[in-house]
């Protein structure tokens, strides 16, 4: 990654294996005898470090690109001001009103159904599902979502999971208004956590906790059980594990791909024309994010339901995951990067550094033997 | 440019350009400023070690700790000066000077056997024994006409590396 020009970055982006991606630069040509100048010349390693400081493909995935202002001259500026007045003064209160009304209707219907209709579980579930779908539609209406769905709607069958690229928690809401999915979510604090606990439990959501290491096995078991159940809602998984800025996809975690069932890819692409739907969880809370959406003109987005995929004979889950990621990235026009999304929260494993050290060490030893 | 508290003025850009000996064009300096602000998440005016290490490509570099010592607490002007060694407009001599600074850990103008050993240790980790490392360095030092207890100064580095094809360049993306 010495001279980081964009053309070499493009060819490197398709590699699924991080180790391969990182070590190409430190492998030198034919071993020659080792001189003092060779030993002292640490420029390749330094160049890689400087290249990473100047630009790196991981940070790019989480950059919120703020839109260029267009209101810079004498007739556009008043128009823009008028727009601000309309958005904050008229649209926003109206939307908050719609949302509040929606919540009231929802709770008025949901709570009695949830607590009173015992014994007719099938009916209860059906009504709860419809209510959740309705509530999601209200949410979408509250930011004037213009969403085009392409492809066959998801059907309720066992032995299938849906995977989608992740940009914000609103991905879930957008998909949920069409079909009541059971989704795997990170447990959140605050009012979101409250909603997770009370309402989303009813559609069969599964919780995970990024910071707990044993968590993965527990979640994997729960997922497996869910896909085998006949009456469960179809399961939706975001294999990236974190929100990405809708220009790139990070590596998919293989959990969803080693269940032995059909994987139905869903590609989501937001149009940034009015607002950038990327939720930069390090910079804003979900409430702020929602407020931002509710004070813009509209959220425009395309959703593509793609053909269900099955693991091919001789294909390992990671390859399967990469193949599906490829499909989603191509459909939604996203670039692939070979990074694990969890690197947002954790440092890379020391094994990667050790691998580089090993390669360097071997080349030094080999050159030492040359006379 | 989400979290920048101030924009760069033309004066600022020219000042930074002076400070780094015109290693970067004005556009590149603006780009570097965006990058600096992006890395400096808490807008403290300098990038902490932790913030550098949040770049996975940097964190896996074997020399990251050593470079962090040099990068710690740098403000934007000094940051650009640090990176100027990687500009194609900078002479080979200046690049060698930078390399010398990386080796010269305690900044006393002399690079000793132990300094070279320390860098080699960072680069090879546990994959070569300490003894082998010392052997390698002793051998190449003696072959170049130095002794194990010699200390190298900058002019020695210039002589040793002056004719090598040192490639140390990074391209600053202009957005």
Image (cartoon, coloured by chain):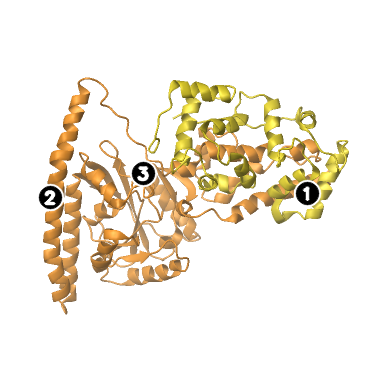
Chain colours: A orange, B yellow
* Sequence-earlier tag: 1 or 3: 3
| Nearest the eye: A181 or A358 | A358
Instruction: Assess disc 1: are there few (<14), some (14-19) or many (≥20) residues with their C-alpha within 10 Å of its C-alpha.
Output: some
Give left or right: position of A64 versus B20.
left
Mark 1 lies on a secondary structure that is helix
* Sequence-earlier tag: 1 or 2: 2
Q: Is residue A2 visible?
A: yes
| Quarter occupied by residue B150 | top right
| Residue A365, disc | 1
> Would you place residue A344 above or below residue B26 in this image?
below
Q: Select label 2 or label 3 by which is in front.
A: 2
Q: Are marks 1 and 3 in contact (CB under 8 Å)?
A: no
* Sequence-earlier tag: 2 or 3: 2
- The percent position of residue A175, horizontal first and vertical second, equals 26, 54
- Tell me the CA gap for discs 1 and 2: 72 Å
Q: Are marks 2 and 3 in contact (CB under 8 Å)?
A: no
The residue pinned by badge 3 equals A246
Give left or right: position of B47 versus A177.
right
> Would you place residue A157 above or below residue B31 in this image?
below
- Tell me the CA gap for discs 1 and 3: 45 Å
- The percent position of residue A193, horizontal first and vertical second, equals 29, 62
Q: Same chain for labels 1 and 2? Say yes or no.
A: yes
Give left or right: position of A305 versus A346.
left
């Amino acid at each position: 990654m010495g001279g980081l020009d964009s053309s070499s970055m493009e060819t490197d982006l398709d590699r699924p294996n991080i180790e391969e991606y990182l070590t190409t630069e430190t492998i030198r040509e034919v071993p020659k005898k080792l001189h003092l100048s060779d030993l002292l010349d640490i420029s390749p390693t330094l160049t890689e470090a400087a290249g990473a400081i100047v630009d790196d493909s991981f940070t790019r995935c989480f950059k919120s690109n703020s839109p260029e202002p267009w209101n810079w001259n004498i007739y556009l500026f008043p128009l823009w001001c008028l727009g601000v007045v309309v958005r904050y003064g008229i649209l926003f209160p109206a939307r908050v009103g719609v949302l509040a009304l929606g919540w009231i209707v929802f709770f008025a219907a949901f709570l009695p159904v949830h607590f009173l209709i015992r014994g007719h579980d099938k009916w209860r579930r059906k009504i709860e599902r419809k209510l959740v779908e309705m509530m999601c539609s209200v949410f979408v209406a509250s930011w004037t979502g213009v969403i085009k769905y392409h492809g066959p709607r998801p059907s309720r069958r066992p032995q299938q999971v849906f995977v989608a690229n992740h940009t914000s928690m609103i991905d879930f809401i957008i998909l949920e208004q069409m079909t009541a999915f059971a989704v795997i979510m990170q447990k959140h604090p605050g009012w979101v956590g409250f909603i997770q606990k009370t309402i989303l439990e009813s559609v069969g959501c599964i919780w995970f906790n990024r910071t707990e290491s044993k968590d993965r096995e527990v979640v994997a078991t729960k997922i497996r059980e869910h896909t085998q159940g006949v009456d469960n809602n179809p399961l939706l998984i975001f294999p990236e594990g974190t929100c990405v800025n809708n220009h790139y996809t990070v590596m998919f975690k293989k959990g969803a791909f080693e269940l032995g069932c059909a994987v139905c890819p869903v590609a989501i692409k937001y149009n940034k024309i009015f607002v950038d739907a990327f939720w930069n969880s390090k910079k804003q809370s979900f409430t702020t994010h929602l407020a931002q959406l509710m004070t813009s003109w509209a959220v425009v987005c395309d959703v593509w339901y793609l053909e269900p995929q099955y693991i091919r004979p001789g294909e390992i889950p990671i390859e399967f995951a990469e193949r599906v990621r490829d499909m989603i990235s191509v459909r939604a026009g996203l670039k692939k990067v070979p990074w694990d999304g969890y690197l947002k929260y954790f440092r890379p494993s020391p094994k990667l550094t050790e691998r580089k050290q090993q390669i360097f060490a071997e080349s030094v030893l080999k050159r030492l033997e040359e006379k | 440019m989400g979290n920048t508290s101030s924009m760069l003025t033309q004066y600022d850009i020219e000042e930074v350009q002076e400070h780094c000996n015109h290693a970067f064009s004005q556009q590149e300096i603006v780009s570097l400023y965006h990058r600096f602000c992006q890395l400096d998440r808490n807008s403290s005016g300098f990038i902490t070690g932790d913030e550098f290490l949040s770049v996975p490509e940097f964190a896996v570099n074997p020399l990251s700790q050593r470079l962090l010592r040099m990068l710690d607490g740098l403000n934007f002007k000094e940051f650009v000066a640090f990176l100027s060694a990687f500009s194609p407009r900078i002479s080979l001599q200046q690049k060698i000077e930078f390399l010398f600074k990386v080796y010269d850990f305690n900044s006393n103008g002399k690079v000793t056997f132990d300094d070279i050993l320390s860098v080699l240790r960072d680069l090879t980790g546990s994959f070569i024994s300490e003894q082998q490392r010392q052997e390698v360095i002793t051998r190449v030092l003696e072959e170049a006409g130095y002794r194990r207890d010699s200390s190298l100064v900058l002019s020695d580095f210039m002589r040793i590396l002056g004719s090598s094809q040192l490639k140390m360049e990074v391209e600053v993306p202009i957005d």
